[in-house]
Image (cartoon, grey):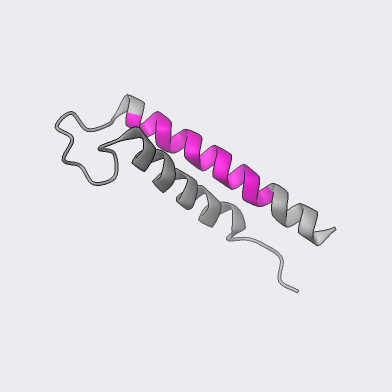
Amino acid sequence: MLNLFFAKRLALGLLVGGGLGLGYWKLVGCSTGTCPLTATPLRALIYGAVLGTIWALGGSPRS
């Protein structure tokens, strides 16, 4: 049961974080292409997914 809960939180963190990272690139972005986090949509999506995963798993119950 705990593994299913963990998998759902992991997937939710990846999807929400990736979506927010891509949204940030689209709305704010980097006009010159020199910004390290948002220079490309893929990089913004990856950073967003990593941060979303950290956020989602930050409050995991400990066993």
Residue at (35% x, 33% y) in the render: 41
Q: Nearer the viewer, residue 20 or 7?
A: 7
Location of residue 46 in the rendering, given as x and y in whole percent from the top left corner: 42, 45
Residue at (71% x, 56% y) in the render: 6
Q: Quadrant of the N terminus?
A: bottom right
Considering only vertical position in the picture, is 3 above or below 42? below
Q: Nearer the viewer, residue 30 or 62?
A: 30
Residue at (34% x, 26% y) in the render: 26
Tell me how many marks there are. 0
**Residue 4 placement, left or right of 54:** right
Asked where in the image residue 40 lies, by quadrant, the reply is top left
Location of residue 45 in the rendering, given as x and y in whole percent from the top left corner: 42, 39
Location of residue 61 in the rendering, given as x and y in whole percent from the top left corner: 71, 65
**Residue 46 placement, left or right of 63:** left
Considering only vertical position in the picture, is 10 above or below 29? below
Q: Please, what is the dominant secondary structure of the magenta stretch?
A: helix
Question: Does 46 appear in magenta?
Answer: no
Furthest residue in direction right, as rendered: 1
Question: Does 15 appear in magenta?
Answer: yes
Considering only vertical position in the picture, is 23 above or below 48? above
Q: Quadrant of the C terminus?
A: bottom right
Considering only vertical position in the picture, is 5 above or below 60? above
Residue at (35% x, 42% y) in the render: 43
Furthest residue in direction top, as rendered: 27
Range drawn in magenta:
9-25
